[in-house]
Amino acid sequence: MLKLKEKTTELIILGIMYIAVMIYCYVILFGECINFIDTDDFMRVIRTREFFQHYDLSNCVIARSNYPYGCELHWTRLYDFFIIGLTWFIDLFTDSLDQAINYACFCISPILGLVSMVFVFKILDKFIDKDNVFLATALFCASPFLMPFFSFGRPDHHSFITLCIIIYMYYTSQVVLDKTGNKWIYIKAAIAASACVWASPETLIVLLLTDAVLFLSYMNDFEKTANLYFKNLLTACCIGTIAMIPDATPKSAHGLSICLLLMLIPYTTLSKNSLQKDPFFRCWHYICLMFLMIFLTDVQPAEYDKISIVHTTLFLCLAILFAVNLQLIGRKDHLYDAIVWALVIACVFLSMFPRFFMGMSADIPQFVKDIWLCTISELRSPFTGNMVCTFSVYTIITATAIVVKIRELQKQNITEKNVIWVLFIALASCYWICACFAYRMIPYSVLFGLPIIVNLCMSSKYVKNYSKPVRMIITVILACFFLFATSLWCDSDIDEEETVANRKYSDAELFECVDNLSDKPVVIMAHSNHGPKLLYYTKHCVLGAPYHRQTEGIISSYSVMDADKDMNVVRKVLKETNAQYLFIGHKQEKSFPDSFASSVLAGQVPQWLSIVKIPEKFSDYSIFKIDQNLIAKEMEVQKVKE
């Protein structure tokens, strides 16, 4: 009989438990049908369909969305490759490509979750007590903060971002614990770092803080520091290469030049003698600085929420900083010189990209921020709304665990495992600070904080005096308390009236009725949050879609569905967009009592609108047909009066 290893058995148990929990949560919310959870998920499916229609990876525009302006989905393409590959595989066993796309998008996140769980287990197995690995991994699988990332029916990029971060941390831990100096580990870590940044630039926090912690830890160990520099150079090369893939503009030439320059450098890290004696290396970072200032000063305003020349340059600057520090190690005034060089390089970078710290809002007009971006829940502070208690409880638990672990580390020597602990503490703390401003960052703080919390329960000196059964009871109690407290956040986002299981009809039935309004594609005006479902279920064109780059579409939808009623503006928008139907969700419009859409529901129907009869079970929605000829006549009359 086949005997499994203990670790393999634990992974199988964890995997079964994880899938069971995911299936249970999905069935409770949506029943047994295949459905997608939020607007981003529907748009991801639509984007996958668009690829299989045109096989064009460079096209990020959904033409039917925000018609006639189009909708650019700014998401980077790396995640799409996995969905496309899974679709091709599933298509071997399905009747249609569209069905394969739905299945692939429905299952992709749980699959990534299983892979993430395996890597979390392998990371924890390297540096925490063996008895705690299973528990810490189980908390990762069951944490209400992390579970939504990996749910069925949620092909959102956060699951892929989390996986990339976990894989990078796995190879980083190998870099720390490796005693052979095997450069293949550094190459793997560099590739994983590149995947992180390509998945989402918000992972820059992980990469930069990791390199800073490791460099400070290895400052007196030249070989370790040289290898770290080697990893940074490879990372910059990889990111510089992938930055060119989605962009065929002159900026690509800059990226290619950066890559070629960087590829000349790694040979200098092969030995200490080459670093000290090679005059080419001794002045190379100065050449790189001059290159930056001369060749990158004409870079146009960059999009800061996807991979770009900005991030390539940032890693080049970081590599330069490490090059400078390698030459300064051993000098009495090393720290002073390092700080000066850091400030110089930071000034050079910020002079080229002054809006870097503005993040994804750098290219968004202020009025779009005021009317739309401020409504995005994941960008709000957790200290507002019903998140206060949950975030406060998590903060107390995490802060206590961090303080306890820091006090323990202060009394210990610097070891490889302790370096990893410091890294997790730094990342958990940094993401907690970010989470104070936007609670989309809370899951990343939880990701890095869980090992520290488990240590508080089972491994800290304050509980080691107790017997193992007592420690396990303490751990289970705290783990249950942690899961219960953080689950309050998930409950706050669940609207029981909107779950498929509690409704008299499905979205497919509702939007089939909308799809049958016309045999040919027409333009439908709707609230932004309805746009993705209309695009997914129907053949029609839609205004609007919930993405911050679609300035014209957001304004058009806002003017009709949200803003205070101004008939001149409403008529102008409907005429310019050639809208044929008005789709109104009653519940949505309750939030905008003074809008044109709300006034229509209240019975103030202009003559160019006529109600479309739909089945009684869809009474939460109303559809009106727009007569463009009557709008034109009314506008002419209004123009004469003026």
Image (cartoon, helix red, strand yellow):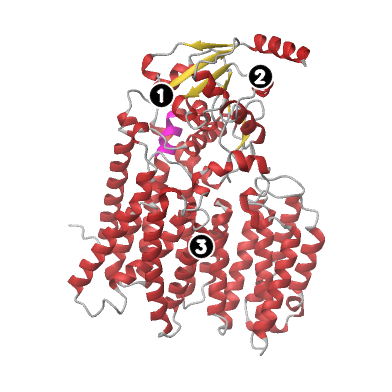
Image location (x, y in percent) of residue 343? 70, 72
What residue would you read off at disc 1?
508
Calculate the distance from the C-alpha at mark 2 to the C-alpha at mark 3.
Answer: 46 Å
**Position above or below: 497 against 640:** below
What residue would you read off at disc 3?
433
- Main SS of the magenta part reads helix
Name which quarter of the figure residue 627 lies in.
top right
Residue pictured at 72% horizontal, 58% vertical: 354
Residue pictured at 33% horizontal, 71% vertical: 455
Q: Is residue 254 left or right of residue 422?
A: right
Residue nearest the viewer, comparing 511 with 559: 559
Name which quarter of the figure residue 218 lies in.
bottom right
Residue nearest the viewer, comparing 500 with 180: 500
Screen quadrant of the N terminus: bottom left
What secondary structure is found at the residue carrying circle 1? helix
Q: Are marks 2 and 3 in contact (CB under 8 Å)?
A: no
Q: Residues within 10 Å of mark 3 (few under 14, many from 20)?
A: some
- Label 2 sits on what residue type? Arg
Image location (x, y in percent) of residue 158? 48, 49
Magenta residues? 99-106
Viewer-side label of 2, 1: 2
Calculate the distance from the C-alpha at mark 2 to the C-alpha at mark 1.
Answer: 31 Å
Residue nearest the viewer, comparing 33 with 327: 33
**Position above or below: 344 against 85:** below
What secondary structure is found at the residue carrying circle 2? helix
**Position above or below: 334 against 319:** below
Q: Do the residues labelled 2 and 1 touch (CB within 8 Å)?
A: no
- Label 1 sits on what residue type? Ala
Is residue 273 visible from the viewing direction of this image? no
* Numbered circle sitting on residue 571: 2
